Image (spheres, rainbow, N blue to C red):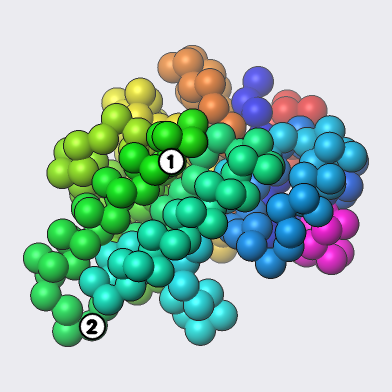
Amino acid sequence: MPRLAANLSMLFTEEPFLERFAAAAAAGFRGVEYLFPYDHPAETLAAELQRHGLEQVLFNLPAGDWGAGERGIACHPDRVEEFRAGVDQAISYARVLGNPRVNCLAGITPKDADPEQVERTLVANLAYAAERLQGAGIRLLVEMINTRDIPGFHLNCTAQALALREKVGSANLFLQYDIYHMQIMEGDLARRLESHLALIDHVQLADNPGRHEPGTGEINYRFLFEHLERIGYQGWIGCEYKPAQDTRSGLAWLKTHNLI
């Protein structure tokens, strides 16, 4: 049976953020993830995890001004020092939270930037982050994101991510495979998951279209859950979807897919 983590940036948003830990535990989740922890003291978040018996599974490196539309700064040549400071901040949080993996959002390709410089910047930043995180016992992930939801996002398909990993040359760089994004960009989900299983350290889900819970769209999640078990995936699956209505009524998909 897959290990499911509630994404608290998208689920239980009917409640204030710090109350979502209790809601996730009450719904049967044993792991949580979210976009960023940095708006709250690490000790406050750690107390919620301990109080509700939850494991911190994943969060992202600082990604610039999210409210202003930025979606990562790793490929921005003029933001290298900010990126490196963000790596240190992520490490400090991960240590307190017992978080074993951190995801890097490459960002939207800067307009009018030299493409070769953008790529060199991303490679150098990932190499720096991979080494710093490895020293702290933390895995670095990169995520491919569809360019329909985020036009211009720099990293958007599996082949590109694999080529990037080769350029970085670090064993501490893994893939975060978001089924929703990859269904939009390339499909062939089962084969790609199996082919790159050794490099996939985290999986996320949502259905397509709509980015709602499994069972609301075209993706055959019953098959994919069985497939992931069959090929031996041992990691977490982050439930990073937007409930079609309210979170709790939308969780009926867990019973439908025999996950509870």
Over which residues does the magenta segment extend?
A: 12-20
| Residue 258 at least partly seen | yes
> Could you tell me which residue is drawn at 48 percent across and 54 percent down?
88
Q: Horizontal and vertical percent for residue 93? A: 62, 50
Residue in view at x 68 percent, y 43 percent: 96
Residue behind mark 1: 133
| Helix, strand or loop status at disc 2 | loop
**Which quadrant of the figure contains the C terminus?**
top right
| Picture quarter with the N terminus | top right
Q: Quick check: can you spot residue 28?
A: no
In the rendered structure, which amino acid carries the disc numbered 2? Lys
Residue linked to disc 2: 111
> Of helix, strand and loop, which one carries label 1?
helix
- x and y percentages locating residue 196 in the rendered image: 31, 29
- The three-letter amino acid code for the residue at tag 1 is Leu
Query: Quarter of the image holding residue 141?
Result: top left
C-alpha span from label 1 to label 2: 30 Å
